[in-house]
Amino acid sequence: MADRKPARKTVRLKVPVEAADLADLEIGSVVYLDGVIYTAREGVYKKVLEEGASLPDGLAQLSNANFHCSPAAAIEADGSYSVGGVTATASFRFSKWMSAWLERSQARIIIGKGGMSAQDYRDILVPAGAIYLTTRGYGTGALLGRGIKGVSAVHWLGELGNAQAMWIFEVENFGPFIVESDLAGNSLFEQQSQMINANLEKLYAGLKKPALSRYGETDDRKDELI
Amino acid sequence: MIEYQTIEDAARKIMANAAIDIPPDYRQGIEDMAKWEQGELSCFVLQTMMDNWNAASEDRRPMCADTGLPRYYVKVGNDARLDCGFTGLERALRSATALATHDIPLRPNRVHPLWRTDHNNNVGINAPEIDWSFEPEADWIDITTVHKGGLFGTDYRMLFPGDGIDGIKRFYLDTLVAFGKRGLACQPAIIGIGLGGSKDTTMVLGKQAACLRVVGDRNPDPKIAELELELKKLGNSIGMGAMGFVGNAMVADCHIEVGYTHTGGMPMSVHAFCLSSRRATVRIHTDGKCEYRHDPQWFTPYMRRETVEWPIESQHEKRSG
Protein backbone atom coordinates (compact mmCIF):
# COMPACT_ATOMS: atom_id res chain seq x y z
CA MET A 1 0.00 0.00 0.00
CA ALA A 2 2.48 2.62 1.17
CA ASP A 3 5.01 1.69 -1.51
CA ARG A 4 2.34 2.21 -4.16
CA LYS A 5 1.48 5.68 -2.90
CA PRO A 6 0.96 7.72 -6.06
CA ALA A 7 2.90 10.87 -6.76
CA ARG A 8 -0.10 13.09 -7.42
CA LYS A 9 0.42 16.70 -8.31
CA THR A 10 -0.35 18.78 -5.23
CA VAL A 11 -1.27 22.46 -5.34
CA ARG A 12 -1.95 25.05 -2.63
CA LEU A 13 -4.35 27.83 -3.59
CA LYS A 14 -5.06 31.13 -1.87
CA VAL A 15 -8.79 31.96 -1.69
CA PRO A 16 -10.23 34.11 -3.15
CA VAL A 17 -8.66 32.57 -6.25
CA GLU A 18 -7.80 34.39 -9.46
CA ALA A 19 -8.81 32.95 -12.83
CA ALA A 20 -5.14 32.29 -13.60
CA ASP A 21 -4.80 30.09 -10.47
CA LEU A 22 -7.36 27.68 -11.88
CA ALA A 23 -6.06 27.53 -15.44
CA ASP A 24 -3.35 24.96 -14.80
CA LEU A 25 -5.38 22.58 -12.64
CA GLU A 26 -5.83 19.08 -14.03
CA ILE A 27 -8.43 16.55 -12.99
CA GLY A 28 -7.03 14.21 -10.36
CA SER A 29 -4.66 16.81 -8.89
CA VAL A 30 -4.68 17.30 -5.13
CA VAL A 31 -5.56 20.75 -3.78
CA TYR A 32 -5.23 22.43 -0.37
CA LEU A 33 -6.78 25.84 0.31
CA ASP A 34 -5.70 28.85 2.40
CA GLY A 35 -7.81 31.92 3.06
CA VAL A 36 -11.58 32.12 3.45
CA ILE A 37 -14.29 29.70 2.33
CA TYR A 38 -18.01 29.63 3.05
CA THR A 39 -20.76 27.04 3.23
CA ALA A 40 -23.93 27.41 1.19
CA ARG A 41 -26.46 24.77 0.25
CA GLU A 42 -30.23 24.56 -0.39
CA GLY A 43 -31.20 26.75 2.58
CA VAL A 44 -28.97 29.64 1.49
CA TYR A 45 -29.77 29.17 -2.21
CA LYS A 46 -33.51 29.39 -1.51
CA LYS A 47 -33.03 32.38 0.76
CA VAL A 48 -30.98 34.37 -1.75
CA LEU A 49 -32.25 33.18 -5.12
CA GLU A 50 -35.92 32.54 -4.39
CA GLU A 51 -36.72 34.86 -1.50
CA GLY A 52 -34.49 37.68 -2.70
CA ALA A 53 -32.31 38.07 0.40
CA SER A 54 -29.11 40.08 -0.11
CA LEU A 55 -25.75 38.39 0.05
CA PRO A 56 -23.53 39.35 2.96
CA ASP A 57 -21.63 42.56 2.12
CA GLY A 58 -18.40 41.98 0.24
CA LEU A 59 -18.80 38.20 0.04
CA ALA A 60 -17.16 37.92 -3.39
CA GLN A 61 -14.14 39.95 -2.25
CA LEU A 62 -13.83 37.82 0.86
CA SER A 63 -14.17 34.40 -0.78
CA ASN A 64 -15.13 32.73 -4.02
CA ALA A 65 -15.10 29.14 -2.75
CA ASN A 66 -18.49 27.62 -1.90
CA PHE A 67 -18.37 24.43 0.18
CA HIS A 68 -21.44 22.17 0.02
CA CYS A 69 -21.25 21.36 3.67
CA SER A 70 -22.84 21.64 7.08
CA PRO A 71 -20.31 21.69 9.89
CA ALA A 72 -20.43 19.74 13.13
CA ALA A 73 -20.36 22.94 15.16
CA ALA A 74 -21.95 24.39 18.25
CA ILE A 75 -22.55 27.86 19.64
CA GLU A 76 -21.20 28.31 23.15
CA ALA A 77 -22.89 30.29 25.90
CA ASP A 78 -20.49 33.23 25.35
CA GLY A 79 -21.47 33.39 21.66
CA SER A 80 -18.27 31.79 20.37
CA TYR A 81 -18.28 28.82 18.02
CA SER A 82 -16.70 25.42 18.40
CA VAL A 83 -16.14 23.55 15.15
CA GLY A 84 -15.46 19.82 15.29
CA GLY A 85 -15.60 18.33 11.82
CA VAL A 86 -16.67 19.42 8.36
CA THR A 87 -17.76 17.01 5.64
CA ALA A 88 -19.05 17.53 2.12
CA THR A 89 -22.60 16.79 1.10
CA ALA A 90 -23.76 15.56 -2.33
CA SER A 91 -23.78 18.41 -4.84
CA PHE A 92 -25.99 17.07 -7.63
CA ARG A 93 -29.09 18.09 -5.65
CA PHE A 94 -28.16 21.76 -5.93
CA SER A 95 -27.88 21.80 -9.72
CA LYS A 96 -31.05 23.85 -10.26
CA TRP A 97 -29.65 26.81 -8.31
CA MET A 98 -26.04 26.73 -9.43
CA SER A 99 -26.20 28.87 -12.55
CA ALA A 100 -27.89 31.80 -10.80
CA TRP A 101 -25.77 31.26 -7.71
CA LEU A 102 -22.45 31.43 -9.58
CA GLU A 103 -23.57 34.65 -11.21
CA ARG A 104 -24.69 36.26 -7.94
CA SER A 105 -21.90 35.05 -5.70
CA GLN A 106 -19.06 35.09 -8.23
CA ALA A 107 -17.95 31.73 -6.77
CA ARG A 108 -15.21 30.05 -8.82
CA ILE A 109 -14.64 26.95 -6.72
CA ILE A 110 -17.39 24.55 -5.75
CA ILE A 111 -16.40 21.96 -3.16
CA GLY A 112 -18.63 18.99 -2.44
CA LYS A 113 -19.37 15.30 -2.58
CA GLY A 114 -19.92 13.28 -5.75
CA GLY A 115 -19.55 16.09 -8.27
CA MET A 116 -22.22 17.12 -10.71
CA SER A 117 -23.20 15.72 -14.09
CA ALA A 118 -20.94 16.27 -17.08
CA GLN A 119 -23.72 18.32 -18.61
CA ASP A 120 -23.87 20.60 -15.56
CA TYR A 121 -20.16 21.22 -15.91
CA ARG A 122 -20.56 22.11 -19.58
CA ASP A 123 -23.69 24.22 -19.13
CA ILE A 124 -23.09 25.88 -15.76
CA LEU A 125 -19.56 25.68 -14.33
CA VAL A 126 -17.50 26.09 -17.50
CA PRO A 127 -19.30 29.26 -18.72
CA ALA A 128 -18.86 30.73 -15.22
CA GLY A 129 -15.15 29.90 -15.14
CA ALA A 130 -15.64 27.64 -12.13
CA ILE A 131 -14.06 24.34 -11.17
CA TYR A 132 -15.28 21.54 -8.89
CA LEU A 133 -13.26 20.03 -6.08
CA THR A 134 -14.32 16.84 -4.34
CA THR A 135 -13.19 15.97 -0.86
CA ARG A 136 -10.82 12.97 -0.87
CA GLY A 137 -12.97 10.38 0.85
CA TYR A 138 -16.27 11.79 1.97
CA GLY A 139 -16.11 11.18 5.68
CA THR A 140 -12.85 13.02 6.31
CA GLY A 141 -14.47 15.37 8.80
CA ALA A 142 -11.65 15.33 11.34
CA LEU A 143 -8.87 16.01 8.81
CA LEU A 144 -10.79 18.87 7.25
CA GLY A 145 -11.75 20.16 10.70
CA ARG A 146 -8.05 20.61 11.48
CA GLY A 147 -7.77 23.07 8.58
CA ILE A 148 -10.40 25.42 10.00
CA LYS A 149 -8.69 28.14 12.00
CA GLY A 150 -11.66 30.31 12.81
CA VAL A 151 -15.26 31.27 12.16
CA SER A 152 -15.43 34.85 10.89
CA ALA A 153 -19.22 35.00 10.64
CA VAL A 154 -22.38 32.92 10.48
CA HIS A 155 -25.31 34.22 8.44
CA TRP A 156 -28.98 33.28 8.79
CA LEU A 157 -28.23 31.00 11.75
CA GLY A 158 -31.52 31.72 13.50
CA GLU A 159 -33.69 31.26 10.43
CA LEU A 160 -31.91 28.34 8.79
CA GLY A 161 -30.37 26.45 11.72
CA ASN A 162 -26.79 25.24 12.15
CA ALA A 163 -26.86 22.87 9.20
CA GLN A 164 -28.19 25.26 6.56
CA ALA A 165 -26.69 28.56 7.74
CA MET A 166 -23.84 30.19 5.81
CA TRP A 167 -20.64 29.62 7.81
CA ILE A 168 -17.64 31.70 6.84
CA PHE A 169 -14.43 29.92 7.76
CA GLU A 170 -10.83 31.06 7.88
CA VAL A 171 -8.82 28.09 6.66
CA GLU A 172 -5.20 27.03 6.45
CA ASN A 173 -3.84 24.06 4.54
CA PHE A 174 -7.48 23.00 4.23
CA GLY A 175 -7.87 19.71 2.39
CA PRO A 176 -7.10 17.35 0.80
CA PHE A 177 -9.37 17.87 -2.18
CA ILE A 178 -9.19 16.34 -5.66
CA VAL A 179 -9.88 18.29 -8.84
CA GLU A 180 -13.01 16.59 -10.19
CA SER A 181 -13.82 19.10 -12.93
CA ASP A 182 -11.38 21.55 -14.52
CA LEU A 183 -12.02 24.78 -16.41
CA ALA A 184 -12.74 22.78 -19.58
CA GLY A 185 -15.37 20.66 -17.82
CA ASN A 186 -13.40 17.40 -17.90
CA SER A 187 -14.68 15.11 -15.14
CA LEU A 188 -12.64 12.60 -13.15
CA PHE A 189 -15.76 10.71 -12.03
CA GLU A 190 -16.99 10.42 -15.59
CA GLN A 191 -13.61 9.19 -16.77
CA GLN A 192 -13.48 6.57 -13.96
CA SER A 193 -17.11 5.47 -14.48
CA GLN A 194 -16.48 4.80 -18.15
CA MET A 195 -13.70 2.40 -17.23
CA ILE A 196 -15.92 0.65 -14.65
CA ASN A 197 -18.86 0.44 -17.08
CA ALA A 198 -16.76 -1.70 -19.40
CA ASN A 199 -16.95 -4.57 -16.87
CA LEU A 200 -20.66 -4.41 -16.05
CA GLU A 201 -22.08 -6.59 -18.80
CA LYS A 202 -19.78 -9.44 -17.79
CA LEU A 203 -20.74 -8.95 -14.15
CA TYR A 204 -24.45 -9.49 -14.84
CA ALA A 205 -23.96 -12.30 -17.36
CA GLY A 206 -26.19 -15.30 -16.66
CA LEU A 207 -28.24 -13.64 -13.92
CA LYS A 208 -31.85 -13.84 -15.05
CA LYS A 209 -34.22 -10.91 -14.57
CA PRO A 210 -36.69 -10.92 -11.67
CA ALA A 211 -40.31 -11.84 -12.46
CA LEU A 212 -41.61 -8.39 -11.55
CA SER A 213 -40.10 -5.32 -13.15
CA ARG A 214 -40.28 -1.88 -11.62
CA TYR A 215 -41.76 1.30 -13.01
CA GLY A 216 -39.11 3.27 -14.80
CA GLU A 217 -36.62 0.43 -14.61
CA THR A 218 -33.70 0.47 -16.94
CA ASP A 219 -31.45 -2.43 -17.71
CA ASP A 220 -28.65 -0.15 -18.80
CA ARG A 221 -26.46 0.06 -15.69
CA LYS A 222 -24.33 2.59 -17.51
CA ASP A 223 -27.09 5.08 -16.77
CA GLU A 224 -26.51 7.43 -13.89
CA LEU A 225 -29.22 8.15 -11.35
CA ILE A 226 -28.43 11.78 -10.86
CA MET B 1 -31.88 -1.11 40.22
CA ILE B 2 -30.52 0.81 37.21
CA GLU B 3 -30.77 4.56 37.71
CA TYR B 4 -31.78 7.30 35.28
CA GLN B 5 -28.57 9.31 35.64
CA THR B 6 -26.43 6.24 34.93
CA ILE B 7 -28.32 5.68 31.68
CA GLU B 8 -28.07 9.30 30.55
CA ASP B 9 -24.34 9.53 31.34
CA ALA B 10 -23.58 6.20 29.62
CA ALA B 11 -25.60 7.21 26.56
CA ARG B 12 -23.67 10.49 26.30
CA LYS B 13 -20.43 8.53 26.41
CA ILE B 14 -21.43 6.07 23.66
CA MET B 15 -22.60 9.00 21.52
CA ALA B 16 -19.03 10.36 21.73
CA ASN B 17 -17.38 6.93 21.31
CA ALA B 18 -19.41 6.27 18.17
CA ALA B 19 -18.80 9.71 16.65
CA ILE B 20 -15.05 9.79 17.29
CA ASP B 21 -13.52 6.29 17.41
CA ILE B 22 -13.82 3.97 14.42
CA PRO B 23 -14.72 0.43 15.57
CA PRO B 24 -11.59 -1.78 15.56
CA ASP B 25 -13.22 -4.55 13.48
CA TYR B 26 -14.03 -2.11 10.68
CA ARG B 27 -10.59 -0.47 10.85
CA GLN B 28 -8.98 -3.89 10.47
CA GLY B 29 -11.28 -4.70 7.55
CA ILE B 30 -10.28 -1.52 5.71
CA GLU B 31 -6.57 -1.98 6.52
CA ASP B 32 -6.80 -5.45 4.96
CA MET B 33 -8.58 -4.09 1.87
CA ALA B 34 -5.98 -1.34 1.44
CA LYS B 35 -3.34 -4.08 1.18
CA TRP B 36 -4.92 -5.69 -1.89
CA GLU B 37 -6.67 -2.70 -3.49
CA GLN B 38 -5.06 -2.15 -6.90
CA GLY B 39 -7.01 0.95 -7.91
CA GLU B 40 -4.62 3.82 -7.36
CA LEU B 41 -7.20 6.50 -6.58
CA SER B 42 -9.33 4.13 -4.52
CA CYS B 43 -6.30 3.09 -2.45
CA PHE B 44 -5.39 6.75 -2.03
CA VAL B 45 -8.86 7.40 -0.58
CA LEU B 46 -8.57 4.45 1.84
CA GLN B 47 -5.27 5.85 3.08
CA THR B 48 -6.89 9.24 3.67
CA MET B 49 -9.74 7.64 5.57
CA MET B 50 -7.29 5.90 7.89
CA ASP B 51 -5.48 9.22 8.44
CA ASN B 52 -8.86 10.76 9.21
CA TRP B 53 -9.69 8.14 11.86
CA ASN B 54 -6.37 8.83 13.54
CA ALA B 55 -6.99 12.58 13.45
CA ALA B 56 -10.46 12.09 14.96
CA SER B 57 -9.18 9.97 17.86
CA GLU B 58 -6.19 12.26 18.52
CA ASP B 59 -8.23 15.47 18.46
CA ARG B 60 -11.39 13.96 20.00
CA ARG B 61 -13.44 15.39 17.13
CA PRO B 62 -16.09 13.61 15.02
CA MET B 63 -14.64 11.48 12.21
CA CYS B 64 -17.41 12.65 9.88
CA ALA B 65 -19.31 15.92 10.10
CA ASP B 66 -22.47 14.34 8.76
CA THR B 67 -23.99 13.03 11.97
CA GLY B 68 -26.31 10.86 9.93
CA LEU B 69 -29.41 9.94 11.86
CA PRO B 70 -28.21 9.15 15.39
CA ARG B 71 -30.37 6.44 16.95
CA TYR B 72 -30.44 3.71 19.58
CA TYR B 73 -30.90 -0.03 19.87
CA VAL B 74 -31.79 -1.15 23.38
CA LYS B 75 -31.66 -4.74 24.57
CA VAL B 76 -33.30 -5.22 27.93
CA GLY B 77 -32.56 -8.18 30.17
CA ASN B 78 -35.78 -9.84 31.26
CA ASP B 79 -34.87 -9.22 34.90
CA ALA B 80 -33.61 -5.63 34.50
CA ARG B 81 -35.23 -3.02 36.73
CA LEU B 82 -35.05 0.72 36.10
CA ASP B 83 -35.83 3.44 38.63
CA CYS B 84 -37.23 5.58 35.83
CA GLY B 85 -39.16 2.89 33.98
CA PHE B 86 -38.99 2.53 30.22
CA THR B 87 -40.39 5.95 29.36
CA GLY B 88 -37.66 7.29 31.65
CA LEU B 89 -35.08 5.40 29.61
CA GLU B 90 -36.47 6.96 26.43
CA ARG B 91 -36.20 10.38 28.04
CA ALA B 92 -32.60 9.69 29.07
CA LEU B 93 -31.70 8.78 25.47
CA ARG B 94 -33.35 11.92 24.09
CA SER B 95 -31.58 14.04 26.68
CA ALA B 96 -28.21 12.38 25.98
CA THR B 97 -28.69 13.03 22.26
CA ALA B 98 -29.31 16.73 22.82
CA LEU B 99 -26.42 17.09 25.28
CA ALA B 100 -23.96 15.16 23.11
CA THR B 101 -24.96 17.21 20.05
CA HIS B 102 -23.77 20.35 21.83
CA ASP B 103 -20.82 18.91 23.73
CA ILE B 104 -18.96 16.87 21.07
CA PRO B 105 -20.21 18.83 18.96
CA LEU B 106 -22.29 16.91 16.43
CA ARG B 107 -24.00 18.51 13.48
CA PRO B 108 -27.71 18.91 14.20
CA ASN B 109 -29.10 16.87 11.34
CA ARG B 110 -32.68 16.27 12.34
CA VAL B 111 -35.29 18.52 10.81
CA HIS B 112 -39.04 18.32 10.22
CA PRO B 113 -39.53 16.69 6.78
CA LEU B 114 -41.89 19.39 5.54
CA TRP B 115 -41.21 22.54 7.56
CA ARG B 116 -37.45 21.87 7.96
CA THR B 117 -37.72 22.98 11.58
CA ASP B 118 -34.38 22.34 13.31
CA HIS B 119 -34.16 22.16 17.10
CA ASN B 120 -30.37 22.12 16.76
CA ASN B 121 -30.16 19.07 19.04
CA ASN B 122 -30.97 16.02 16.86
CA VAL B 123 -34.24 15.51 18.75
CA GLY B 124 -37.71 15.78 17.26
CA ILE B 125 -40.82 13.84 16.30
CA ASN B 126 -39.81 10.15 16.17
CA ALA B 127 -36.17 11.14 16.58
CA PRO B 128 -33.93 9.61 17.73
CA GLU B 129 -35.41 6.22 16.88
CA ILE B 130 -35.24 3.65 19.67
CA ASP B 131 -35.51 -0.03 18.72
CA TRP B 132 -36.15 -2.51 21.54
CA SER B 133 -35.31 -6.16 22.02
CA PHE B 134 -35.19 -8.46 25.03
CA GLU B 135 -32.85 -11.07 26.44
CA PRO B 136 -33.81 -13.90 28.80
CA GLU B 137 -31.97 -14.57 32.05
CA ALA B 138 -30.23 -11.20 32.22
CA ASP B 139 -30.57 -8.18 34.51
CA TRP B 140 -28.51 -5.70 32.45
CA ILE B 141 -29.46 -3.37 29.62
CA ASP B 142 -27.37 -2.97 26.46
CA ILE B 143 -27.61 0.36 24.66
CA THR B 144 -26.08 0.74 21.21
CA THR B 145 -25.99 3.98 19.29
CA VAL B 146 -25.54 4.01 15.53
CA HIS B 147 -24.81 7.14 13.48
CA LYS B 148 -25.51 6.20 9.89
CA GLY B 149 -25.88 8.53 6.94
CA GLY B 150 -29.40 8.60 5.69
CA LEU B 151 -29.49 9.51 2.02
CA PHE B 152 -27.87 6.87 -0.19
CA GLY B 153 -26.93 3.21 -0.36
CA THR B 154 -30.24 1.59 0.62
CA ASP B 155 -32.94 0.01 -1.50
CA TYR B 156 -35.88 -2.37 -1.18
CA ARG B 157 -37.43 -4.78 -3.66
CA MET B 158 -40.15 -7.41 -3.62
CA LEU B 159 -38.67 -10.52 -5.17
CA PHE B 160 -40.41 -13.89 -5.51
CA PRO B 161 -39.31 -17.43 -4.70
CA GLY B 162 -38.86 -18.14 -8.45
CA ASP B 163 -36.33 -15.30 -8.70
CA GLY B 164 -34.04 -17.40 -6.52
CA ILE B 165 -30.41 -16.61 -5.76
CA ASP B 166 -30.10 -14.96 -9.20
CA GLY B 167 -32.68 -12.38 -8.17
CA ILE B 168 -30.84 -11.75 -4.92
CA LYS B 169 -27.52 -11.30 -6.69
CA ARG B 170 -28.97 -8.98 -9.33
CA PHE B 171 -30.68 -6.69 -6.84
CA TYR B 172 -27.58 -6.67 -4.66
CA LEU B 173 -25.42 -5.65 -7.63
CA ASP B 174 -28.01 -3.09 -8.76
CA THR B 175 -27.89 -1.38 -5.38
CA LEU B 176 -24.09 -1.42 -5.13
CA VAL B 177 -23.58 -0.15 -8.68
CA ALA B 178 -26.30 2.51 -8.49
CA PHE B 179 -25.12 4.03 -5.21
CA GLY B 180 -21.46 3.17 -5.66
CA LYS B 181 -21.08 5.52 -8.60
CA ARG B 182 -19.29 8.68 -7.49
CA GLY B 183 -19.11 7.01 -4.08
CA LEU B 184 -22.54 8.16 -2.94
CA ALA B 185 -22.72 5.11 -0.65
CA CYS B 186 -19.34 6.07 0.92
CA GLN B 187 -17.96 2.59 0.23
CA PRO B 188 -16.21 0.31 1.07
CA ALA B 189 -18.93 -0.49 3.54
CA ILE B 190 -20.43 -3.26 5.60
CA ILE B 191 -23.38 -4.34 3.48
CA GLY B 192 -26.47 -5.58 5.30
CA ILE B 193 -29.14 -7.62 3.56
CA GLY B 194 -32.61 -8.22 4.90
CA LEU B 195 -34.51 -11.18 3.46
CA GLY B 196 -38.10 -12.02 4.27
CA GLY B 197 -40.49 -10.87 6.93
CA SER B 198 -43.06 -8.26 5.94
CA LYS B 199 -41.82 -5.28 3.92
CA ASP B 200 -40.98 -3.17 6.95
CA THR B 201 -39.30 -6.13 8.68
CA THR B 202 -37.12 -6.65 5.59
CA MET B 203 -35.91 -3.07 5.85
CA VAL B 204 -35.31 -3.29 9.60
CA LEU B 205 -33.41 -6.59 9.37
CA GLY B 206 -31.15 -5.34 6.57
CA LYS B 207 -30.36 -2.14 8.44
CA GLN B 208 -29.57 -4.05 11.61
CA ALA B 209 -27.44 -6.56 9.66
CA ALA B 210 -25.34 -3.66 8.33
CA CYS B 211 -25.05 -1.68 11.55
CA LEU B 212 -25.15 -4.20 14.39
CA ARG B 213 -22.83 -7.00 13.24
CA VAL B 214 -19.04 -6.70 13.11
CA VAL B 215 -16.66 -7.42 10.23
CA GLY B 216 -15.88 -11.14 10.22
CA ASP B 217 -19.11 -12.20 11.91
CA ARG B 218 -21.03 -14.97 10.13
CA ASN B 219 -24.69 -15.98 10.22
CA PRO B 220 -25.08 -19.19 12.28
CA ASP B 221 -26.86 -20.92 9.38
CA PRO B 222 -23.93 -22.38 7.39
CA LYS B 223 -25.68 -21.95 4.03
CA ILE B 224 -26.48 -18.30 4.75
CA ALA B 225 -22.89 -17.82 5.95
CA GLU B 226 -21.72 -19.21 2.61
CA LEU B 227 -24.01 -16.81 0.72
CA GLU B 228 -22.64 -13.90 2.78
CA LEU B 229 -19.12 -14.76 1.66
CA GLU B 230 -20.21 -15.28 -1.94
CA LEU B 231 -21.92 -11.89 -2.05
CA LYS B 232 -18.93 -10.21 -0.43
CA LYS B 233 -16.72 -11.62 -3.18
CA LEU B 234 -19.23 -10.64 -5.87
CA GLY B 235 -19.38 -7.06 -4.59
CA ASN B 236 -15.61 -6.84 -4.67
CA SER B 237 -15.52 -8.00 -8.29
CA ILE B 238 -17.58 -5.12 -9.72
CA GLY B 239 -14.42 -3.21 -10.57
CA MET B 240 -15.41 -0.25 -8.42
CA GLY B 241 -13.66 1.01 -5.29
CA ALA B 242 -13.80 3.93 -2.88
CA MET B 243 -15.56 7.06 -4.17
CA GLY B 244 -16.62 5.14 -7.27
CA PHE B 245 -13.07 5.15 -8.62
CA VAL B 246 -11.67 2.16 -10.49
CA GLY B 247 -10.72 -0.55 -8.01
CA ASN B 248 -12.24 -3.46 -6.10
CA ALA B 249 -12.66 -2.30 -2.50
CA MET B 250 -16.43 -2.17 -2.25
CA VAL B 251 -17.63 -4.55 0.47
CA ALA B 252 -15.86 -4.73 3.85
CA ASP B 253 -18.23 -7.53 4.80
CA CYS B 254 -21.71 -8.77 3.92
CA HIS B 255 -24.26 -9.73 6.58
CA ILE B 256 -27.60 -11.38 5.89
CA GLU B 257 -30.52 -11.57 8.33
CA VAL B 258 -33.72 -13.45 7.59
CA GLY B 259 -37.31 -13.46 8.81
CA TYR B 260 -40.09 -15.88 7.96
CA THR B 261 -42.06 -14.31 5.14
CA HIS B 262 -45.19 -14.61 2.99
CA THR B 263 -45.28 -17.97 1.25
CA GLY B 264 -45.44 -16.26 -2.15
CA GLY B 265 -42.71 -13.70 -1.64
CA MET B 266 -39.03 -13.04 -0.99
CA PRO B 267 -38.72 -9.35 -0.09
CA MET B 268 -35.17 -8.05 0.05
CA SER B 269 -33.40 -4.94 1.27
CA VAL B 270 -29.80 -3.83 0.85
CA HIS B 271 -28.14 -1.32 3.19
CA ALA B 272 -24.64 0.13 3.01
CA PHE B 273 -23.07 1.35 6.24
CA CYS B 274 -20.24 3.76 5.34
CA LEU B 275 -16.57 4.64 5.58
CA SER B 276 -17.37 6.15 8.96
CA SER B 277 -19.18 3.13 10.41
CA ARG B 278 -20.14 4.68 13.72
CA ARG B 279 -21.46 2.40 16.42
CA ALA B 280 -20.79 2.01 20.13
CA THR B 281 -22.37 -0.05 22.88
CA VAL B 282 -22.61 0.06 26.65
CA ARG B 283 -23.82 -2.64 29.01
CA ILE B 284 -25.28 -1.17 32.18
CA HIS B 285 -25.36 -3.63 35.07
CA THR B 286 -27.84 -3.56 37.89
CA ASP B 287 -25.18 -2.16 40.28
CA GLY B 288 -24.56 0.76 37.93
CA LYS B 289 -21.31 -0.60 36.47
CA CYS B 290 -20.90 0.28 32.77
CA GLU B 291 -18.92 -1.76 30.24
CA TYR B 292 -18.19 -0.12 26.88
CA ARG B 293 -17.58 -2.01 23.63
CA HIS B 294 -17.91 -1.79 19.83
CA ASP B 295 -19.66 -5.10 19.12
CA PRO B 296 -23.41 -4.60 19.70
CA GLN B 297 -24.06 -8.38 20.06
CA TRP B 298 -27.58 -7.62 18.93
CA PHE B 299 -28.43 -10.85 17.10
CA THR B 300 -28.44 -13.32 19.98
CA PRO B 301 -29.68 -16.90 19.61
CA TYR B 302 -32.84 -15.71 21.37
CA MET B 303 -33.35 -13.03 18.66
CA ARG B 304 -33.08 -15.66 15.94
CA ARG B 305 -35.31 -18.24 17.67
CA GLU B 306 -37.53 -20.30 15.39
CA THR B 307 -40.11 -21.89 17.64
CA VAL B 308 -42.61 -21.01 20.37
CA GLU B 309 -40.63 -22.12 23.39
CA TRP B 310 -37.36 -20.77 24.73
CA PRO B 311 -34.96 -22.19 25.67
CA ILE B 312 -35.45 -25.15 23.38
CA GLU B 313 -33.33 -27.48 25.58
CA SER B 314 -35.31 -26.96 28.77
CA GLN B 315 -38.55 -27.75 26.95
CA HIS B 316 -36.97 -30.93 25.68
CA GLU B 317 -35.92 -31.79 29.23
CA LYS B 318 -39.39 -30.99 30.52
CA ARG B 319 -40.97 -33.39 28.08
CA SER B 320 -38.47 -36.19 28.60
CA GLY B 321 -38.55 -35.70 32.39
Image (cartoon, rainbow, N blue to C red):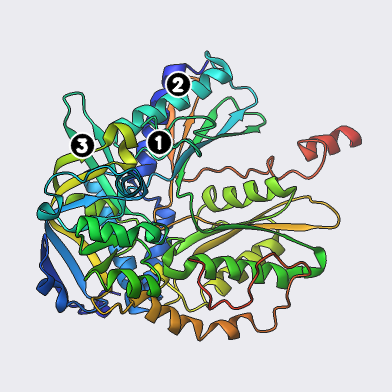
| Residue A112 visible within the image | no
Residue B14, which numbered label? 1
> Where's residue B209, x and y in %?
59, 52
Dot 1: what SS? helix
Q: CA distance from mark 1 to mark 2?
A: 16 Å
Q: CA distance from mark 3 to mark 2?
A: 32 Å
Give the vertical position of B262 relative to B1 (above or below). below
Marks 1 and 2 in Cβ contact (< 8 Å): no
Instruction: Residue at 16% x, 73% y: name it.
Output: A22
> Where's residue A124, x and y in %?
32, 69
- Can you identify the residue that label 3 sits on? A82
Q: Nearer the viewer, residue B283 or A224?
A: A224
> Where's residue B203, x and y in %?
64, 49
Quarter holding residue A112: bottom left
Q: Are marks 1 and 2 on the same chain?
A: yes
Q: Are marks 1 and 3 on the same chain?
A: no
Q: Chain of mark 1?
A: B
- Can you identify the residue that label 2 sits on? B288
- Please tell me whether mark 3 or mark 2 is closer to you in this view: 3
Quarter holding residue B184: bottom left
Instruction: Residue at 36% x, 66% y: name it.
Output: A115
| Residue A27 visible within the image | yes
* Side (left or right) of A32 relative to B141: left
Image quarter hosting the C terminus of chain B: top right
Instruction: Residue at 31% x, 54% y: name it.
Output: A68
